[in-house]
Amino acid sequence: MKMNRIQIRKLFAVLFMAGGLVACGNAQTQEKQNNNQLKSENKMKTIELTKADFLSKVADFEGNPSEWKYLGDKPAIVDFYASWCGPCKSIAPILEELAAEYAGEIYIYKVNTEREQELAAAFGIRSIPSLLFIPMEGQPQMAQGAMPKASFKEAIDKVLLNK
């Protein structure tokens, strides 16, 4: 009987140590995942705007209603969307990818038309998604509806970056 207890204790010790090794491996795996997450967080993401943010970062259409003056330091896209909108949901991951791909070259802003009704009304948003392409110089251009990624890239390159 004592032999069985000794064997059980040895087995328990081996299992405990093996569990410790697995936990250590999991800790290393977790550390790698955390590092990868930090790297992906450093990539540009879309930026949610309120009306106040829009007035300070994009254009102060209240202070100067007769003239468009872009306030940003890079071209931008403003996505007017709603959380319940299917086409809006379909382009959201595309816009996130583009924000990462064009990080440092353009901004991609998002305006929730349900929360920012006054801002949506100021731009005459009647259907969503509506996308405002804002070059550094000249007038912004509005596009409506979902587009494939290739069309977004073409618009970014031609309208915003003049490539």
Image (tube, rainbow, N blue to C red):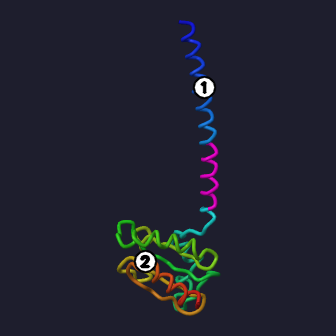
Question: For this rendering, which residue is in front, 107 or 125?
Answer: 107
Residue 20 to residue 110: above or below = above
Residue located farthest toward the top when viewing the structure as drawn: 1
In the image, what residue occupies the spot 57% across and 27% down? 15
Q: Estimate the x, y position of residue 136 in percent, counting from the top left.
A: 60, 88
Q: Is the magenta stretch mostly helix, strand or loop?
A: helix
In the image, what residue occupies the spot 59% across and 91% down? 137
Label 1 SS: helix
Residue 131 to residue 8: above or below = below
Question: For this rendering, which residue is in front, 21 or 154?
Answer: 21
Label 2 SS: helix
Judging by the rendered image, the residue that carries numbered circle 1 is 14
Task: From the image, state whether disc 1 or disc 2 is nearer to you.
Answer: 1
State the extent of the magenta-drawn residues as a range.
27-39
Judging by the rendered image, the residue that carries numbered circle 2 is 120
Which quadrant does the C terminus fall into? bottom right
Asked if residue 33 is among those painted magenta in the image, a careful observer would answer yes
Q: What residue type is labelled 2?
A: Ala
Residue 18 to residue 2: above or below = below
Question: Label 1 vs label 2: CA separation?
Answer: 65 Å
Task: Using residue 113 as the reference point, say whether residue 31 is left or right of it.
Answer: right
Q: Estimate the x, y position of residue 8 in percent, counting from the top left.
A: 55, 17
Question: For this rendering, which residue is in front, 60 or 98?
Answer: 98
Asked if residue 70 is among those painted magenta in the image, a careful observer would answer no
Residue 71 to residue 115: above or below = below
Q: Which mark is residue 22?
A: none
Local crowd at mark 2 within 10 Å, few (<14), some, or many (≥20)? Answer: some
Q: Estimate the x, y position of residue 92 in percent, counting from the top left.
A: 45, 70
